[in-house]
């Protein structure tokens, strides 16, 4: 788990910038539409939708916008036939990448992803080429200065897998299935997360120095800027010093 919080801090800053531009809203709306279409419009019966709503609210999306997206998905309207596709590949210095897309045009998606990778020192991999390095897990992060003992007690009681501290921040680790239950229990105990998501986490990470990390971040940002790309996961690790340089 070492390095998760540091790299996540960089990603969260990027997400905040995206939110200001409104770009992240487009991706969140697409997730809401697909979740509602696949599992129904009631978040109590649809954990995936519940997680999507939570993510949208944390990004300051208006409730009315969320409700409209859910209604679109539940109504099965025209133009909402998105396909979930996962691409695997490599970036500079051999970093592993998992690229998740929601698209209505598979040919467009693969062409755009391949183009970005090739232009920035990466290449596409075959299915399964890097997926074995990753596991799906929930991570609920709390900022430095939070009550570690109290969070740990509440999290483990709620069914969390582990609680990890890294550079002062606190990460509560869950299975994908228990993620929302643990997050809700922590909220009810008075702990408000800085970030919370279910993501693909690498078992072994690659440590990068500043220039290498900067190239990797630029590649990931370019991939995330593609309309069809929802999430990009990597096995990157950075030191505290490199993190400060990247965020400076």
Image (cartoon, rainbow, N blue to C red):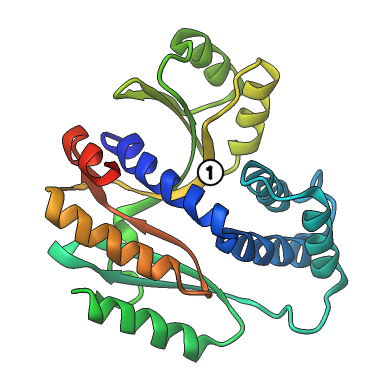
Count up the numbered dots. Answer: 1
Q: Which residue is painted at 38% across and 24% down in the image?
A: 169
Q: Would residue 204 be visible to someone looking at this image? A: no
Could you tell me residue 174's position as x and y percent? 50, 34
Question: What is the x, y in percent for residue 72?
Answer: 82, 69
Identify the residue at horizontal 43%, vertical 14% (top origin): 145
Residue at the image position 55 percent from the left and 44 percent from the top: 176
Q: Which residue is mark 1?
A: 197
Q: Check the picture and name the quadrant holding the C terminus.
A: top left
Task: Tell me where residue 225 appears, x and y as whole percent.
Answer: 45, 69
Label 1 crowding class (10 Å Cα cut-off): few <14, some 14-19, many 20+? some
Quarter that holds the N terminus: top left
**Placement of 50 over or under 103, stated as above or below:** above
Q: Quadrant of residue 58?
A: top right
Q: Is residue 116 something that shows in the picture? A: yes
Residue 239 vertical placement versus 91 (above, below): above
Q: Nearer the viewer, residue 38 or 233?
A: 233
Instruction: Measuring from the top left, give residue 29's x and y in whole percent.
Output: 68, 63
Secondary element type, mark 1: strand
Residue 123 located left or right of residue 30:
left
Residue 111 image-quadrant placement: bottom left
> Horizontally, is 109 left or right of 91 in the view?
right
């Amino acid at each position: 788990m070492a390095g998760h919080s540091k790299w996540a801090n960089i990603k969260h800053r990027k997400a905040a910038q995206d939110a200001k531009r409104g770009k992240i809203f487009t991706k969140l709306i697409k997730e809401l539409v697909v979740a509602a279409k696949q599992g129904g419009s009631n978040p109590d019966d649809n954990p995936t939708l519940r997680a999507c709503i939570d993510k949208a609210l944390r990004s300051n999306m208006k409730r009315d916008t969320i409700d409209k997206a859910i209604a679109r998905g539940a109504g099965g309207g025209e133009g909402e036939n998105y396909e979930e596709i996962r691409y695997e590949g490599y970036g500079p210095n051999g970093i592993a990448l998992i690229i998740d897309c929601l698209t209505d045009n598979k040919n467009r998606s693969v062409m755009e992803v391949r183009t970005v990778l090739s232009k920035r020192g990466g290449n596409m991999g075959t299915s399964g080429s890097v997926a074995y390095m990753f596991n799906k897990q929930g991570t609920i992060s709390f900022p430095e200065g939070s009550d570690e003992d109290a969070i740990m007690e509440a999290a483990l009681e709620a069914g969390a897998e582990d609680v990890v501290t890294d550079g002062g921040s606190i990460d509560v680790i869950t299975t994908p299935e228990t993620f929302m239950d643990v997050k809700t229990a922590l909220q009810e105990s008075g702990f408000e997360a800085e970030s919370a998501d279910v993501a693909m986490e690498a078992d072994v990470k690659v440590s990068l120095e500043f220039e290498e990390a900067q190239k990797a971040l630029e590649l990931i940002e370019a991939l995330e800027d593609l309309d069809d790309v929802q999430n990009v996961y990597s096995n990157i690790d950075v030191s505290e010093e490199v993190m400060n340089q990247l965020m400076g």
